Amino acid sequence: MASSSGTASSRTASPGKVPTGGASVGSASPGDGGDGDGRPAGAVARVRRQLPTSPWLFAAPGLLVVGIFILYPFVSTVVNAFTDRRTLIPGEFVGLANFRELLHDEMFWIGLRNSTLYVLGVVPALVLLPLLLALLVQKNIPGIAFFRSAFYTPVVASIVVVGLIWVWLLDERGLVNSLLEAIGVGRIGFLSDQWLLLLSAMTVTVWKGLGYYMIIYLAALANVPRELHEAAAVDGAGAVRRFLTVTVPAVRSTMVLVGALSSVAAFKVFSEVYLMAGPGGGPAGEDTTLVMLVQRTGTGLTGRVGYASAISVVVFVVTVALMLLVLRADRKEDA
Amino acid sequence: MPRRALAAAVVALVLPLSACGSGGDDSGSTDASGKVEGDITFQTWNLRANFKPYFEGLVADFEKKYPGTNVKWVDQPAEGYADKISADAAGGTLPDVVNVSPDLVAPLAKAGLALDLDKAAAKYKKEYLPGAWASHEIPGTEGTYAFPWYLNTGPLFYNKSLFKEAGLDAAKPPKTYDELFDDALELADKSDGKVATLANVPTIEDFGRYGVELMNKEGTAFAFNDAKGVELLTKYKELYDAKALDPQALTATPESSGKKFLTGAVAMNPGSALDLGNFKKQAPNLYKNIGITDQITSTGKVNMYVMGVMVNAQTKQKPAAVAFAHFVTDAQNQMSFAKKVAIFPSTAGSLDDPYFTEEDGTDETRVRIAAAKSLKNAVNYTPVLFSEQMKTELRNSVAKALQGKVSPKEALDNAVKACDRLLQQQG
């Protein structure tokens, strides 16, 4: 804090950086004369007296919002991670005890495994499928707006409603199982088998995210020069080859962006798994993700806030690492 | 100047935050004597939707009885009620009088936020059933931390036609766990695994009703991993393997198992007298075949749920808060509430009222009378120190045993170990 405040004050005190009201505004004294723009000296002096604080006054509402709703909760989480704080008991500093306990907590490893599997299962699908979908609806043909809207519909639907509908579909006596039974396959425990449950939740995530990323890709595809496609076509490239040699390189940055966004979202998945696997996290809690574990451990009157904060810190570190990894890969390709 | 501005910004940032934190350091005195006056807030648990006129009348009566008092009634939804209370408790904004259950009172009492009524309101103790008053005692602390309010116990509903189809006598539903296990295996066998008898894994109340000792006498450690506990879980494993327990029981919630019962996928389900109306409306065919029986118990004592009304130990209006909490829970008001909804008063002698003893030929009355009768020796099997986190530990261990990943003994040993660790961490 000390170094940052020093930096901030030195910046605002630097007269040369202030763009308005004359070059020497920051350092002027009330007794100075006019500054040559024809305004009376007194008025300029007033302006000169007010200016150094006014940027802070303008920034104050934003600083308050950022401070109270972003920085304070974040810093509190990090601080709490080193305490044994509980909901109603402030707790004491315990050093790395929470993190050491994590290493021996079976449920933490289950959560880490499931969150990682979620990234591995969902991200490739969310990078590729929306791109293919965007290519399909890119053409300006009559009625295409209907399909664009239709594919976007899951994005605006409430995740709770979506979760409930998929639970009805995949229930032991739901529509999908009834169809499977009718064609002689027999009923499948989509919501009672640990792995099928996770896969079902991934399917819902992909289904719900398709439209969102499709829109991002549509914007990127609009910027791909048509001449490149035409030139490739003249050279005899078919649709697949044009996709691989023209479209993919042109939207590669967008693919990286989609990869980064979807991997962070996938690692922090909560709603889909919570709704489909139940608050307990599936049979024996085997489908619990890390964020579900944070919720389960840290809430309620007996919640272990310190321990839940330690898990949150791990989630934060992994997500930052994921972002860096994706962006670094992008830079390497650029180089 | 900029430095000062920055300092001001930091102060402005920190000041509101310093108001957060638990409680304050009110002395927490238990003295509730003095004039009953002032403004108090009363919080209920999901009761506004159906009982708004009752509570408005209650508040008006109290304000009339004690001029100079003003009660602000707030109601919170059922979902996330514990989280709302914990946020209020941590933020120092807990209402003066709060509707709670014993497991919610326990952490609040330990944090010094619940008023000890043995000290502040001992004179009212004799008005309540002894068991109900004792239900808000917290092991490890001295005192009683909430007025007992309404009691509830649910019958067990069963689908007579499913029983008949399996060749079972629908007039003789199971009463004990042994009878239940026999009937469930028969039902699964006859329906080729298509009809399960139960849709939920055993909970701590099941262990209690089976006769398992849940905690040691001192209330310092859990004990449900004894031979009897292992026996119960082994039986449930047998049911699960035979599909007498629904395959989705491992992830079921009370709501989802209720739906399974409505659709005839499950033959038995616990409920309350309120459910009858629901069956009539949503599943008329089921309603025609509905059987009502007592809870399954091998101890002879059914499980009861207790609601309480707690007084915030930090309240600035102790006399008014205690007087109002007592007013809400006194015999007259509990009886009047019981006539509006299927609950049972916790006040001494109320269950002898003709309303709870005389048949009028309807199913609703039959359920009410049977429940009132069973309440006289019912037990609140859920230990007050059994937190949500502990429920999850037990549920997960039970699921592992049912899946065959660990033996029932190992599963219960693990659950007890995890629950004991959480108990110690609660302080």
Image: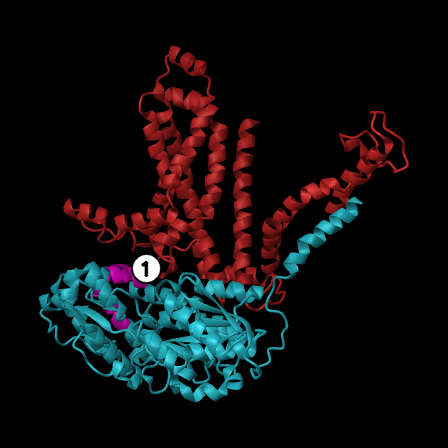
Chain colours: A red, B cyan
Closer to the camera in the image, B54 or A227: B54
Q: What's the magenta region?
A: B234-259
Q: Amino acid at mark 1?
A: Thr
Which image quadrant: the C terminus of chain B? bottom right
Q: In x, y percent, where is residue A258?
A: 47, 35
Q: In x, y percent, where is residue B5?
A: 75, 47
- Report which residue position mark 1 lands on: B251
Q: Which quadrant of the figure has residue A138?
A: top left
Q: Is residue B240 magenta?
A: yes
Q: Residue at x 41, y 81 (%)?
A: B330
Q: Is residue B386 left or right of residue B17?
A: left
Q: In x, y percent, where is residue B365?
A: 22, 76
Q: Residue at x 51, y 73 (%)?
A: B108
Main SS category, magenta section: helix
In the figure, A71 relative to A55: above or below? below
Which image quadrant: the N terminus of chain B? top right
Q: Chain of mark 1?
A: B
